[in-house]
Image: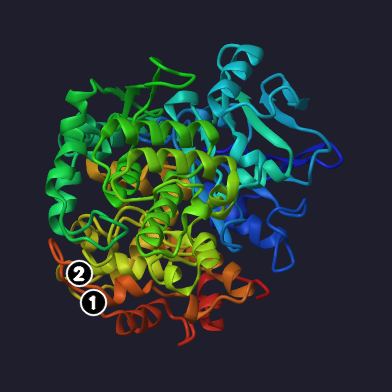
């Protein structure tokens, strides 16, 4: 078996039992790895009766055939579980160096179930697999936890862990890898699942490379992409993921003042990447096997890590904890990012939740008594930082109200606040406005984990049309988006199953390259048709998981503000949503309620009970 080790770990934290299980060849080819492995395992092991924070929930940590295989941007891993934030399918992707180090321990995946009686961490290495006490680590932030464990476990160890927010079961808690460099499996509250299991961390240290069928072919693909990775992705390498923030403001893609305001050019100029790399002397950081190095490193100011090198905020964080709060002080945004990474909390959820608090306070829906006297006004860095600390700790009335994310928070305030909360299926919007690109409106509404931009339909979709075998998208405000959205979602499932970073698309990586990595790693001769059909199968199993939980067309929706408020500025358009959704269901081969049909199940070779 090439590209895989052909086995995974099954860990029962309740009993302490550790078992090695073989992976069957037909399972591997049908689900590829990463997201595909996780989705199928979650479907088989959990269901409507599963409490997301109960011992019966499972966590699947999975790599793909590209992980540790030498391909560009391929040292990632996926975590899949039933989400405590949304109550539905949950998934988070993470970069850094943990993924390849885990793959080198000789396993492709680890399934974690049950609940330990006392805090533990899972140690996986060439020397063996065991559970160790983490009682001395409980309460530590993620930076400190990783330092202690790296020192304890020795050279070559990589750590993924939760902070105090995950321990407190805050439902937007994240899992952090790479220490102060802050690579995060941020979405869907999977850090709370770890906390519910008394699992503080997973440490990995291995040196067993998977056998690659055709390493020369991998090198050829890398060579063919080498120049475009340097040239086409130069902006991200030079200025990070915020390199285009001012352009996004110009076209109406950047969220401003809780997704209401149209323009903010002066503020965007102050917090964009090309400004902050100079004002804050930011340095580059690269995940494993990445020639782009879009990550940036800054210097902590104040607090326990004053003067130390830490992760600088990515675009999503700057957009949602900067522009969306009308905060243009980069020092504040840097501190917000540090707080989220230390406590272990999703910056996207946090930024949206604070924005709801500020608008609710502005409208008189949130009182001084509830905020503890904190003046939650837009533009106030002090208010944002204090509210964030309370949220991360679930401290005081305001912190307890905010701790579980924007949807939960707005329900506690009332219907008027729910109307200006930007979320789908309980997951808050990333920092891209669907009124600026109608394909994103459709992608947000139909994503299986909730509002998700990671099918990348908002960027260069015309460039992918030919490669994905669909008709031209006809511009960003065209309603004819069904085909490109569906195919991009399927292809993105393949990225997340191979475990390749989607930013490689900016460097010219197309369908042929991703399939090339798969065939080179495995020795298969998979066709483009089978490849894309596999992505469609993975997307549909996630849909079926939610369908079994009772989700239907009513859940494929968008917030009132997106459908009714013309924000002006770079976009004054509203997506014609219902006709687009009809076209999408028709293209997917689903029925009018958004249910996967029996005919589609047969076409995809899915034998499941819905």
Above or below, 300 against 18 in this view is: above
Q: Quadrant of residue 606?
A: bottom right
Q: Quadrant of residue 516?
A: top left
Q: Which residue is mark 2?
A: 473
Tell me: 415 left or right of 383: right
Please tell me which residue is depicted at 44% across the width and 65% down the height of the picture. Answer: 365
Q: Secondary structure at mark 1?
A: loop
State the count of labels: 2
Calculate the distance from the C-alpha at mark 2 to the C-alpha at mark 1: 6 Å
Residue 513 to residue 231: above or below: below
**Residue 84 image offset from top left, x and y in percent:** 62, 56
Q: Are dots 2 and 1 in contact, CB under 8 Å? A: yes
For mark 2, does the 10 Å Cα neighbourhood hold few (<14), some (14 to 19), or many (20 or more) residues?
many
- Residue 367 visible within the image: yes
Mark toward the start of the polypeptide (2 vs 1):
2
What residue lies at 21% left-to-right and 32% top-to-bottom?
239
Q: Which mark is residue 202?
A: none
**Is the residue marked by circle 1 packed among few (<14), some (14-19), or many (20+) residues within 10 Å?**
many
Would you place residue 481 above or below residue 42 in this image?
A: below
Q: Position of residue 586 (x, y in %)?
A: 38, 83
Residue that numbered label 1 is attached to? 480
Q: Position of residue 172 (x, y in %)?
A: 54, 49
- Residue drawn 73% across and 22% down? 136
Q: Residue furthest bottom?
A: 592
């Amino acid at each position: 078996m090439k590209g895989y080790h052909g086995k995974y770990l099954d860990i029962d934290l309740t009993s302490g039992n550790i078992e090695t299980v073989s992976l069957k060849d037909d399972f591997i080819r049908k689900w590829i790895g990463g997201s595909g492995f996780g989705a199928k395992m979650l479907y088989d092991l959990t269901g409507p009766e599963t409490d997301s924070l109960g011992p019966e929930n499972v966590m699947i940590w999975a790599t793909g055939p590209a992980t540790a295989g030498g391909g560009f941007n391929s040292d990632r891993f996926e975590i899949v579980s039933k989400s405590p934030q949304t109550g539905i399918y949950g998934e988070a992707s993470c970069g850094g160096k943990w993924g390849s180090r885990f793959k080198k321990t000789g396993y492709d995946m680890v399934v974690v179930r049950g609940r330990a009686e006392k805090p533990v961490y899972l140690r996986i290495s060439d020397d063996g697999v065991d559970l160790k006490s983490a009682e001395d680590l409980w309460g530590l932030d993620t930076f400190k936890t990783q330092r202690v464990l790296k020192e304890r476990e020795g050279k070559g160890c990589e750590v993924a862990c939760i902070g105090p927010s995950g321990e407190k079961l805050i439902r937007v808690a994240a899992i952090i890898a790479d220490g102060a460099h802050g690579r995060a499996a941020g979405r869907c509250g999977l850090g709370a699942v770890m906390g519910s299991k008394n699992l503080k961390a997973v440490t990995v240290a291995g040196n067993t490379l998977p056998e690659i069928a055709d390493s020369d072919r991998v090198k050829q693909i890398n060579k063919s992409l080498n120049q475009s990775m340097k040239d086409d992705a130069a902006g991200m390498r030079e200025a990070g993921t915020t390199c285009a923030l001012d352009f996004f403001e110009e076209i109406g893609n950047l969220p401003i003042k809780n997704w209401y305001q149209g323009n903010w050019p002066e503020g965007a100029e102050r917090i964009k990447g090309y400004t902050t790399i100079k004002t804050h002397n930011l340095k580059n950081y690269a995940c494993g096997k990445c020639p782009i190095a879009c990550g940036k490193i800054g210097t902590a100011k104040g607090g326990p890590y004053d003067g130390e090198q830490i992760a600088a905020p990515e675009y999503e964080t700057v957009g949602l904890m900067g522009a969306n709060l009308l905060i243009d002080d980069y020092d504040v945004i840097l501190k917000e990012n540090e707080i989220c990474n230390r406590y272990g909390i999703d910056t996207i959820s946090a930024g949206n939740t604070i924005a709801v608090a500020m608008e609710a306070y502005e409208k008189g829906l949130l009182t001084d008594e509830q905020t503890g006297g904190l003046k939650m006004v837009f533009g106030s860095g002090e208010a944002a930082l204090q509210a964030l600390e309370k949220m991360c700790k679930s401290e005081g009335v305001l912190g307890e109200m905010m701790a579980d994310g924007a949807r939960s928070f707005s329900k506690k305030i009332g219907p008027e606040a729910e109307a200006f909360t930007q979320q789908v299926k309980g997951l808050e919007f990333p920092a891209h406005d669907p009124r600026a690109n109608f394909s994103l409106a459709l992608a947000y509404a139909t994503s299986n984990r909730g509002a998700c931009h990671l099918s990348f339909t908002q960027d260069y979709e015309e460039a992918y049309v030919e490669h994905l075998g669909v008709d031209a998208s006809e511009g960003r405000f065209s309603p004819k988006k069904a085909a490109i959205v569906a195919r991009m979602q399927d292809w993105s499932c393949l990225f997340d199953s191979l475990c390749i970073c989607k930013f490689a698309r900016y460097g010219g990586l197309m369908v042929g390259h991703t399939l090339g990595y798969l065939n080179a790693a495995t020795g298969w001769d998979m066709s483009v048709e089978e490849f894309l059909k596999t992505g469609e199968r993975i997307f549909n199993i996630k849909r079926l998981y939610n369908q079994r939980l009772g989700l239907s067309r009513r859940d494929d929706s968008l917030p009132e503000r997106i459908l009714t408020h013309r924000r002006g500025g770079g976009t004054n358009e509203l997506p014609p949503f219902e006709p687009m959704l009809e076209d999408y269901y028709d293209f997917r081969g689903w029925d009018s309620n958004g249910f996967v049909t029996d005919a589609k199940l047969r076409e995809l070779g899915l034998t499941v009970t819905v």
